[in-house]
Image (cartoon, grey):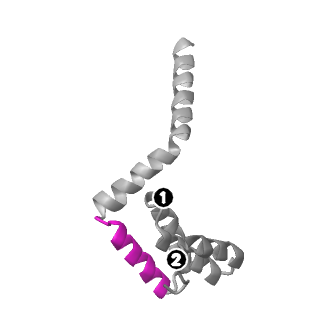
Amino acid sequence: MKIRYIILVLMAAVVAVSLYNSRKLYHCYLTAYYQRFLGEDRIKSIEKARLLFREERYDELEGYADRMMTLYPADYELLRLKGLSLIKTGRKSEGARMVIASLRNNEDVGA
């Protein structure tokens, strides 16, 4: 009976710790997969996102941009591309907010 109780407590602790650190673990997983395994850096990731946008694969682009924005949270180009893909898929207000948020001082949308 004591062994079952100890195992149950350990399992609960593992679940609690993994949920607490899930964002960190997800970031580590993405770093390992995209940067170490695939060899993608920030520039290659942006090029792939642009390619997905040019090929009009907007649903794929949304997921890819989400993952890349976890790795590169300050990248305005990824935010802009995701916003444009949201606009193309019909979620115009959400996409417009992202595009506007991606603009820096005195920058045009087409830049």
Dot 1: few (<14), some (14–19), or many (≥20) neighbours within 10 Å? some
Q: Of 97 and 81, which appears nearest the observer? A: 97
The image quarter containing residue 43 is bottom left
- Write the start and end of the magenta stretch as one range: 39-54
Q: Of 86 and 103, which appears nearest the observer? A: 103
Dot 2: few (<14), some (14–19), or many (≥20) neighbours within 10 Å? many
In the rendered view, tell whether residue 16 sits above or below residue 56. Answer: above
In the rendered view, tell whether residue 33 sits above or below residue 50. Answer: above
Which numbered dot is residue 81? 2
Q: Residue at 52% of width from left, 64% of height from top?
A: 66
- Residue 45 falls within the magenta-colored stretch: yes
State the residue lying farthest toward the right.
93
Q: Would residue 13 be found to the left or right of residue 72 on screen?
A: right
Residue identified by numbered label 1? 70
Residue 46 lies, in percent from the top left, at 41, 74
Could you tell me which secondary element the residue under label 1 belongs to?
helix
